[in-house]
Image (cartoon, helix red, strand yellow):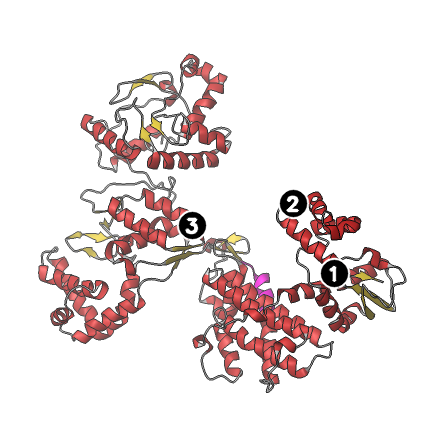
């Protein structure tokens, strides 16, 4: 089907009497002139590669000063000697200069040229950048552009001038409306193209109504959109939404009360169903659903002329949803008690507004946008929705799920094979809301393994029993202080994640990170002769809070563990755990990382040298000025100073002038990452190595001696001359 036939075919379904009287090839028109309506200007017909012959009539009006595609097409054509020669249009094209018709603040004479050059558009094939350029120019001109003196409507805004132009063209009989789908290419399941059709006597909702659209934007601007990146999608849809059919001739659905030949289109009446859900259970149990149904049938059978029945329905919902009217009168009409009607109103008022609507981004262009529009049209502002959360698709083993591929994962199948809690844990940990989830069996098995470890660990803690002694954390061992800090930090940070719908971040912190921390705690306390009472107390302290934290992601396991701990309440009804900022000590995290790094360094040295030493000496805690230099270097580097600038700034201080070489060495190590940007104090470094020396010994597999670098008992190789903070030396 060529473009003339395609355009004629589409127009024949949109209320036009169309007859194809002939056809002409597009290239036959190139170099010819047409007369524009209204201003009667002769305009040449030119070729362009970006024009889609299946969009509209396949012919476009070029405005290169203000349309990026048109501007780039003109530049491309001026460079295309072969096309200019083939069509004999070289003189025409060379003489063309864009005509500026819109004055736009902060832009030059040709806004399209400005934006194209700013974005670095190469040619008409640079579609992504051209689409972005078009959005920028059209948006700026629509809101800020003013028509110039060389136009029919000087001084008017672009929007006003557009409306005046449509009116003027209509008066000449030179204007018509043609509808296209968005996205452009849509096909039926049998592979046939789908087009927009206008049905006679169709009913529409006018989403383009300025007052309605303004209220919808007000609601959107007050809502949380999670992830936030999708807000732009909503704004784009809100801007282009206009007339939309709200009824159809066939299919299932509710008859249009005043015109029963039509059925209400589902997206026109299904987007506030959550309001009815708040009262549906009581409407059914009281028999009101049948009475409402009877009134609705009377309205439809009378084609909307049974005013008593229509008024009864309106009075019921106006009171329940809007609080308008007399509940006694509504109760009398329906033959129920006033208390029931008031109870329905209270039930709705308790649950509304919608705190969060969860869906997929593919519904932004329809259901979710209508959800906002319809709420602001019907309900007062206090009942407007507060949040929309969106998540991307699920694929399986790297492929889209499809029945033809046999890789569909039916929802009822998941709890039977994997358990509900395992599935929830895997889903919550595998991806963020704005990323595609790839369900992989190997990953599920890995998560299942960790879940079993958690279950066994929790039950071992419970088996030991609730401790009878209370431990003062501040006077406990460093490793217990570290674990208590980890769980308090997990509560603090995961609560923020939950508030921001960062479910993956919450799951990683509360399950995986805490599991690793508790296992590390048990490993260390198992070799340092820790107090048994202290360990039991710390583990129970963690488990009480851990089970509460995990309840949202693994509710069944959490309840089971909560009851095994001797509790008679439901953990799902327990308050969310609180954290103590005083018990969070980030320095302990750095200290434990320092221990692990030292162990790994020694293990690597022994592996490379193939030495089996009788003992290892670790020198820790250089003089305090070394720590001061590192902290000062970190501050300067974080402020954007170069390594040289940082060295000069530190050496410029009197107390460090005698240490220029040492300062340069320390600063270079901060820059290259040998020394971390965050370090512990000298006192903490020495204490953690000494307290955990037996753990270090168990990891290395030989005797370990911790030496104070400022006063070592043993330094045969004079290793301390190159020692740095956070960089233990080994002998």
Question: Residue 615 sits in which quadrant?
Answer: bottom right
Prevailing secondary structure class for the magenta stretch in the rendered image: helix
Marks 1 and 3: in contact by CB < 8 Å? no
Judging from the image, what secondary structure is the residue with disc 1 in?
helix
Q: In screen coordinates, is 517 left or right of 302?
A: right
- As drawn, 160 above or below 667: above
- The residue under the point 29% across, 52% down is 373
Which quadrant holds residue 464? Answer: bottom right
Mark 1 against mark 2, which lies toward the viewer?
1
Q: CA distance from mark 2 to mark 3?
A: 37 Å
Q: Position of residue 332 (x, y in %)?
A: 11, 72
Element type where label 3 sits in the image: helix
Residue annotated with mark 1: 624
On the image, the x and y values in percent for residue 357 come to 37, 59
Q: Position of residue 644 (x, y in %)?
A: 71, 43
- The circle drawn on residue 571 is none
Question: What segment is highlighted magenta in the picture?
Answer: 439-450
Q: Residue at x 55, y 69 (%)?
A: 581
Q: Is residue 375 left or right of residue 527?
A: left
Q: Could you say which disc has been placed on residue 230 in the image?
A: 3
> Is residue 445 inside the magenta stretch?
yes
List the residue tagged with mark 2: 641
In the picture provided, is 20 more to the left or to the right than 630?
left
Residue 564: say if magenta: no
Q: Is disc 2 surrounded by few (<14), some (14 to 19) or many (20+) residues within 10 Å?
A: some
Crowding around mark 3 (Cα neighbors within 10 Å: few <14, some 14 to 19, many 20+) is: some
Above or below, 620 relative to 94? below
The answer to which image quadrant residue 223 occupies is bottom left
Number of other residues with Cα within 10 Å of mark 1, as a class: few under 14, some 14 to 19, many 20 or more = few
Location of the N terminus by quadrant is top left
Decide if residue 532 is in sight here: yes
């Amino acid at each position: 089907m060529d473009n003339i036939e395609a355009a004629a075919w589409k127009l024949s379904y949109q209320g036009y009497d169309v007859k194809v009287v002939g056809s002409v090839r597009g290239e036959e028109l190139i170099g010819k002139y047409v007369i524009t309506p209204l201003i009667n200007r002769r305009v040449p017909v030119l070729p362009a590669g970006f024009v889609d012959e299946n969009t509209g009539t396949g012919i476009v009006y070029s405005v290169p000063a203000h349309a990026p595609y048109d501007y780039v097409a003109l530049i491309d054509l001026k460079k295309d000697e072969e096309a200019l020669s083939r069509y004999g249009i070289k003189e025409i094209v060379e003489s063309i200069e864009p005509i500026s018709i819109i004055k736009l603040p902060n832009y030059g004479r040709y806004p399209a040229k400005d934006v194209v050059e700013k974005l670095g558009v190469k040619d008409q094939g640079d579609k992504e950048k051209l689409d972005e350029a078009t959005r920028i120019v059209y948006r700026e001109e629509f809101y800020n552009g003013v028509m110039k003196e060389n136009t029919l409507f000087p001084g008017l805004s672009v929007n006003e001038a557009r409306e005046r132009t449509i009116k003027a063209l209509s008066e000449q009989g030179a204007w018509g409306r043609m509808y296209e789908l968005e996205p452009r290419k849509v096909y039926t399941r049998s592979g046939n193209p789908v087009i927009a059709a206008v049905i006679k006597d169709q009913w529409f909702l006018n989403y383009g109504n300025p007052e309605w659209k303004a209220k919808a934007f007000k609601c959107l601007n007050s809502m949380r959109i999670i992830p936030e990146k999708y807000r732009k999608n909503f704004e784009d849809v809100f801007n282009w939404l206009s007339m939309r059919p709200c009824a159809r001739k066939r299919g299932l659905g509710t008859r249009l009360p005043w015109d029963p030949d039509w059925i209400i289109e589902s997206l026109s009446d299904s987007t506030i169903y959550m309001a009815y859900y708040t009262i549906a259970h009581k409407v059914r149990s009281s028999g009101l659903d049948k009475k409402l149904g009877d009134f609705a049938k009377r309205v439809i059978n009378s084609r909307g002329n049974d005013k008593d029945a229509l008024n009864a329905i309106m009075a019921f919902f106006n009171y329940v949803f809007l609080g308008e009217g007399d509940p006694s009168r509504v109760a009398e009409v329906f033959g129920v008690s006033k208390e029931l009607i008031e109870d329905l109103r209270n039930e709705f008022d308790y649950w509304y507004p919608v705190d969060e609507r969860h869906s997929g981004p593919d519904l932004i262009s329809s259901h979710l946008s209508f959800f906002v529009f319809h709420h602001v049209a019907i309900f007062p502002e206090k009942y407007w929705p507060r949040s929309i959360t969106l998540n991307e698709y699920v694929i399986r083993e790297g492929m889209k799920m499809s029945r033809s591929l046999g890789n569909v994962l039916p929802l009822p199948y998941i709890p039977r094979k994997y358990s509900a809690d395992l599935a929830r844990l895997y889903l919550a940990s595998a991806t963020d809301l704005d990323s595609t989830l790839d369900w992989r069996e190997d990953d599920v098995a890995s998560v299942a393994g960790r879940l079993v470890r958690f279950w066994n660990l929790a039950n071992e803690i419970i088996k030991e029993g609730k401790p009878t002694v209370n431990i003062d954390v501040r006077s406990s061992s460093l490793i217990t202080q570290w674990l208590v800090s980890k769980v308090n930090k997990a509560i603090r940070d995961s609560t923020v994640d939950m508030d921001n719908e960062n479910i993956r971040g919450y799951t990683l912190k509360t399950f995986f990170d805490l599991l690793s921390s508790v296992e590390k705690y048990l490993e260390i306390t198992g070799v340092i002769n820790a107090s048994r009472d202290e360990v039991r107390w710390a583990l129970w302290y963690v488990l009480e809070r851990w089970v509460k934290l995990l309840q949202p992601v693994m509710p069944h396991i959490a309840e089971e563990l909560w009851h095994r701990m001797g509790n008679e309440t439901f953990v799902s009804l327990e308050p969310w755990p609180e954290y103590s900022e005083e018990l969070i000590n980030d320095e302990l995290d750095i200290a434990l990382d320092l221990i692990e790094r030292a162990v790994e360094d020694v293990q690597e040295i022994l592996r490379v040298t193939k030495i089996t030493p009788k003992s290892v000496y670790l020198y820790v805690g250089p003089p305090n000025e070394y720590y001061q230099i590192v902290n000062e270097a970190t501050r300067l580097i974080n402020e954007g100073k170069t390594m040289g600038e940082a060295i000069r700034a530190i050496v410029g201080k009197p107390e460090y002038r005698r240490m220029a070489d040492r300062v340069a060495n320390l600063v270079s190590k901060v820059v290259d990452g040998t020394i971390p940007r965050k370090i512990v104090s000298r006192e903490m470094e020495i204490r953690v190595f000494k307290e955990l020396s037996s753990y270090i010994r168990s990891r290395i597999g030989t005797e370990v001696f911790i030496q104070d670098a400022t006063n070592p008992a043993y330094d045969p190789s004079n290793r301390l001359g190159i020692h740095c903070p956070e960089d233990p030396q080994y002998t």
